[in-house]
Amino acid sequence: MSALLETTELTVSYGGLHANSNVNIKAEKGKLTGLIGPNGAGKTTFIDAITGFTNVSSGRAEFNGNDLAGVVPSDRAKRGLVRTFQSLELFEDLTVWDNLIVMAEETKWWSFLADIVKPNRVLGIEEQAEWALNLLGLAEHREKLTLDLSHGQRKLVSVARALAAKPSMLLLDEPAAGLDTVESQQLGQHLREILKQDISIFLIDHDMGLVLSVCDYIYVLDFGKIIAEGTPEEVRNNPEVKRAYLGETAGEMQAEGGAAAARTLSGEG
Amino acid sequence: MKEAIAYSIMGLGAGGFYALMAMGIVVAYKGSGVINFSHGAIAMYVAFQFYNLRTEGIFRLPWFDILPTSWLNIPVKFSLNDGMPINFWLCVLLALLTSVLIGALIHYLVFKPLRNAAPLGKVIGAIGVMTYFLGVASLQFGSNIPNPEAVLFKDDLFQNFLGLGLPVSVEALALAASAIIVGAILWAVFRYTRTGLATRAAAGNEKGAVLLGYSPEKLALFNWVLAALLAGLAGILAGTVTGSLSTGKFTALIVPALGAALIGSMSSIPLAIGGALLIGSLQTFTSTWMVGESWFPSWLQSGARDAIPLIIIVAVLFLKGKSLPIRGNIEEKRLPLAPYPKRVGKYVAIFVPLGFILAAGLPGDFLFAGLTGNWGFSFTASLVAAMFGLSFVILAGYVGQISLVQISLAGTAAFITARFVANEGPSDANPFAVGGPHWPWPLASLVGIIAAVLVGLIVAIPALRIRGVQLAVVTIAASISMWTLFFDNPSATKLQGGSAYEFGTPHFFGVDIGSTSSSGLTDNPKYTLFCLIVLAGLCVVVANLRRGSTGRRFLAVRANERAAASAGVNVPGTKFLAFGIASAVAGVAGVMTAYQTSSTAATNWEYGIGLSALAFCYLGGITSINGAILGGMIAGGGIVSTFGSFHSPGLYSYTAIMGGLGMIATAIIHPAGQASIFQPLMRHFGSWLLVARGKEWGVVLKRLWPFLLGGGAWGAIGINPWRTDSWNRGWMIVLGILIVLFVRNIVTQVKAAKAAKALPDTNSLQEVTA
């Protein structure tokens, strides 16, 4: 088994604060790896660090065996390491379809000259975008502006957009936040579907229910440090995890629809 | 060495003036989060007001009489002492009162309504105020350049100051000292008074300040009045330090002041003062001592002084652009949508021949002889202005980059082209003519356009690191500095005494397509056709870019730079590309302007002209091609303004005022511009003409008949039904109707905007998707 994404002693500091300290993670090819942790644990910082949106203070991140240091975010995306954002960050002036196409198309320095002559060229990436659109059930919204969609639909567009590039690894930042239980379950099914397409997934969420039910391997982050790792079964029975989650943030999990997760943790699920 | 130090000390006078200005900019930014580009214009207005009060006792109000009646007027001008000077302190008081009035007005009329606008909207608002004051000042004070007297310590000199061997005026030192005193007072106000503390709190976190019970609006009002007072104080105290300046050059002093405010990170008053004094010293040191050194390049001598603030601004933004405080507003709106262009080919196929008929008239001049004389010239001017507008559409509309340097790029293209098309040098007819290699015009134009692209790309380098409002700061500084460094610099341009480059007549396969027709007027319909074809070509290019992968990347970057990067879009590369294309388009417009007037001079490319052009493009709709075309039609000197002047002569002098007001109103009421309203109207109208029944016609006519009749009657003035030679003005009836419908459209929009305020703000551009 080769690790597609691997971090070694990755540390991100803001001044004196260590948002991530010495994080070691391996995400295997073809697997769904999860990263959970309470709010403020440093999950999004971690994803920002791997995708180049924040500076790594020390340690290294490797993707496909290549060191990512000094690679700008857009090039990381081109190498197949694609992310979504918790705050969606869609291109609101473009249609759903164009959102996907921006992600999928390869451009050259002379592309603009080709555009002047023939703007609606066949790009050869339509099939992949079509697949992503259909997988997430967005076909009927194809020509709509993302502004006109509901929050749940926009969420799906953000996942579809990331998939349109046919990445080798998809990093999902809190995809279940704001979804109801049914939508969350559907999302889980979609993720399994995506894995079949030879796209590995790295899922970040604090919805324990979703993460425990779909992931192959899970890391638990708290105060910037990995406090546990293992299969869903192992994580579920880890006392450290129980303390981090139930001891301090049980009330908040309730609010986030985490009741199911709490049941799972206590062994009823 | 002693001399160098003495010169630096002399520069403290200008530094003190910049410090007063910079403090005002900082205060306005703290109070409302707006980088106030109009600050220099306000200081200019008060300075001119003060000068006129002191010399003639004339007090003016910062507006103009819009009423066409001679018996009912809006009060504007008061002669307090029959043209004789009045008491000095009364002058100061009245000038400061003017500042207070201006501060309150711009708060209530401009920045309060724009509180939640997109950053571009706020910049446009500030530039609108600037354009307005430039217009009002040139209307009220004309082109006379005052020679102000010193206010502080008139005529006092320190002979041999500190033993440095040179006299230093007491005024300069007093100005620097008063800036420091005012700064200390301000610092205390912000540190120890409740309002000051609340302002600082709101600058950090507006929501927090609201929760603590402070009204951000009252705070903003307080700070706008304070900022305007500081501008006024700077204008009053400037005295001889700034020398005798035109309205435009005085307003341009915003650049060093902005540089100083940026050194203070838009928040620190002591740092801003320090920066201002430094800039003032450096400027005088450079322009008096350094230029005398043998190693100093001769072509830089006249512009060195103005290059310093630009260098400082670029350096500060480059080094700490990302750490400048960005205000967290409670709510922030987006730029209007950039519609997907449709049926471009059809529009071109219809409007190019139609435009040509408009220019050339019907065959045999049957009923309509075409646009001749001033009409033909202004129609062509509109087409060229539309080309120029397209460069704003690409950069600001599609990529969200506010560039105010486009006018300088257009000028660069025109100047470089001029050098290459020129043939022999000075002659008897034109002793100032500049010689050159006399290349064929297409080749020379190409070289000019390439030069514009190169300059545009250099300006774009800082844009890769900074964005939004900060880019506007850099580009306006670049535009102003380029004018003094290049356009108005005889050692760089070889133009003596404000003379112009001569453009030859372009020929196309032996046909004269120059703008001068056989009658000797600049109304050659063949040149209009040339412009139509170039404009159509540019429109197709821009439309295709928007529709293709380039446009998708442009809009992705505009919507969200982070997300664009995560989608594999090379954000700096995309911005660079947009700058390059927009520079080329501006270059084309520059060359076409030069061919239109057959000559080009420095005065054609001043920053104020660029601001006006931006104003009208924004009014038309900065995010769409139609917006640029509409903007061109209504631009100063364009076909609509000529139509206005036909009936009310002198309307041309209101161009800047109208542009400024239109810009502000558009930013507040309908940021998408007028074109977005016309677009569905045109589309519906086209299909409607074919299918509408008599009954439907009746309904529309019933609603619109007063406007149709009124507009038609207005246009028909000057047509005598008994004189066939006046029939060729028949088309003006149509134009009159169109203009009246346009005005009605604006009024309806204002009403709709008021009605929409009660409702939650759905996007105003739903038609785009329909």
Image: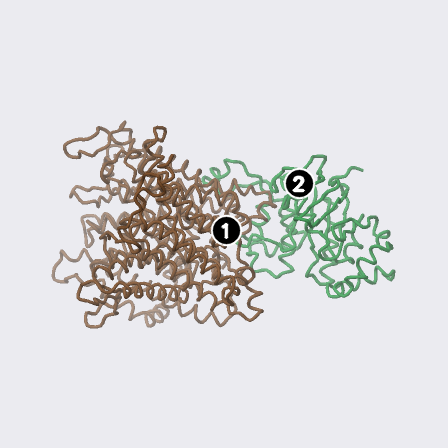
Residue B258 visible in the current orientation: yes
Q: Chain of mark 2?
A: A
Left or right relative to B442: residue A43: right
Residue furthest front in the image: B163
| Chain A palette colour | green
Quarter the C terminus of chain A occupies: bottom right
What residue do we see at 51% from left, 50% from top?
B558
Left or right relative to A157: residue B218: left
Q: What chain is colored brown?
A: B
Residue for badge 1 = B265
Distance between the Cα atoms at labels 2 and 1? 39 Å
Q: Quadrant of residue A175?
A: bottom right
- Viewer-nearest of discs 2 and 1: 1
Residue for badge 2 = A80
Q: Position of residue B395 (x, y in %)?
A: 44, 47
Residue B345 visible in the current orientation: no
Q: Position of residue B346 (x, y in %)?
A: 39, 49
Three-letter residue code for mark 2? Gly
* Secondary structure type for disc 2: loop
Q: Nearer the viewer, residue B224 or B413?
A: B224
What residue do we see at 20% from left, 59% from top?
B649
Q: Nearer the viewer, residue A207 or A141?
A: A207
